[in-house]
Image (cartoon, grey):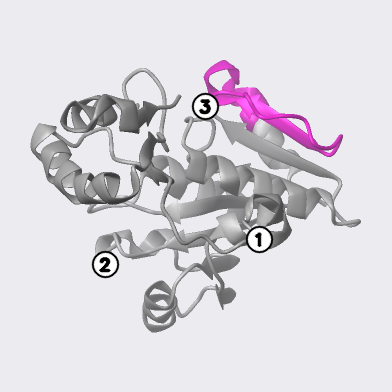
Amino acid sequence: MNILLMGYYGQRNIGDDLFVKQLTNYFSGKSNVGKVFVLCKEDYYPQISEKVIYFSESNLPKLKKLGLILRSDYIFWGGGTLNIGSSPPKNLLRLKTLSKLMSKGFGFLGVGLEGSNSESYPLFDKCYLLYLRDKYSYELALNHFKNTQFICLGGDLAFLELSFYEPFIATKNRSEFKNISFSGKYWWGEGRGEFYAKQLIPVIEKYNSVIHLLPSHVGDETNDNQFHELLRKYLPEKNCQLHS
C-alpha cells in the first residue's frame, strides 16, 4: 500500500520536522508499505529510504498532486495542534471528500484538538482514523465524532520511537547548571525578553551558566531568534550564545 503524508512540513520548525522523521521511519520500515509520499513547503529532508519521496508543494502541479492521491491508499495529516480557527480549512475538507469518493482512507495522526470547536467538527467526523495525542482531545473525539472508524489515544509523534534520543541523554548526574537552553517565540516582544532575563540572571550569577538560545522555528519571517535578540540585551554577553 502507499501512504500520503501532509502537515506543517518543510516550514523549518523542529517539532514538525521531528514528526516527519518519526513517521517516515515508521512507515518505511513496514513490509506492507510500498511508497510514502510527503507533501512539504520546502524539500530539505535527508533521503532515508527508497520508499520515501518528498514533494515541494510550491512546485507541484495540481494534476500531479491528484495523481499522488490516486496512487495512495491512505492520506494522513500528521502531528501538532490543529489551530484551524472557527471553521475547517476548505482545502482539507475538499481533500477529505475527494478521498472518500476515491475510497481512500483519510485521517489524522498525533493531533491535538484543543483549538477546535463545533464548526470544525465536520473535518474530523467520518474519518478513517483519528489518532489523538492527549486525553482531552481523545475524550472530545469520543463525545462528538461517532462515525469515525478508529479513534485512538497515543502521544506526541515526536516520541513515536524513543531510541532516536538515546545518544543525546546524559548518563551522569549533574549537580550544576553550566549550560541551559532557552527557546522563545518569534512574535514575543521586548517586555517578555526582560521578564525572562530576570528569571535567568540569578541562575547565571550562581552557576556562571551559559544560556544557549535555540530557535525552534527558523526562516525569514518566522525566526525565533528575532525574540532571542531582544532577550540577550538583558543578559551578560559572556553568558549568552545565539544559535542558528
Mark 2 — residue? 118
> Can the viewer see residue 192 in this picture?
yes
Of the residues tagged 3 and 2, which is closer to the observer?
3
Instruction: Identify which residue, 124 or 225, lies in the foreground.
Output: 225
Chain-order first, disc 3 or disc 2: 3
Callout 3 amino acid: Lys
Looking at the rendered image, the quarter that the C terminus falls into is top left
Mark 3 — residue? 41
User: Callout 2: helix, strand or loop?
Assistant: helix
* Image side of residue 40 versus residue 142, left or right: right
Image point 57% across, 58% down: which residue?
Answer: 157
Of the residues tagged 2 and 1, which is closer to the observer?
1
Residue 54 in the image: state x and y as whole percent.
69, 30
How far is disc 1 from disc 3 in space, using C-alphas? 38 Å
Residue 240 in the image: state x and y as whole percent.
33, 31
Instruction: Identify which residue, 238 or 186, lies in the foreground.
Output: 238
Residue 160 in the image: state x and y as whole percent.
64, 61
Mark 1 — residue? 171
Chain-order first, disc 1 or disc 3: 3
Residue 96 in the image: above or below residue 117: above
Q: Which residue lies furthest to the right in this view?
A: 31
Of the residues tagged 1 and 3, which is closer to the observer?
1
Mark sitting on residue 225 = none
The segment highlighted magenta reads 42-65
* Image side of residue 219 versus residue 199, left or right: right
Callout 1 amino acid: Thr
Residue 200 in the image: above or below residue 121: above
Callout 2 amino acid: Ser
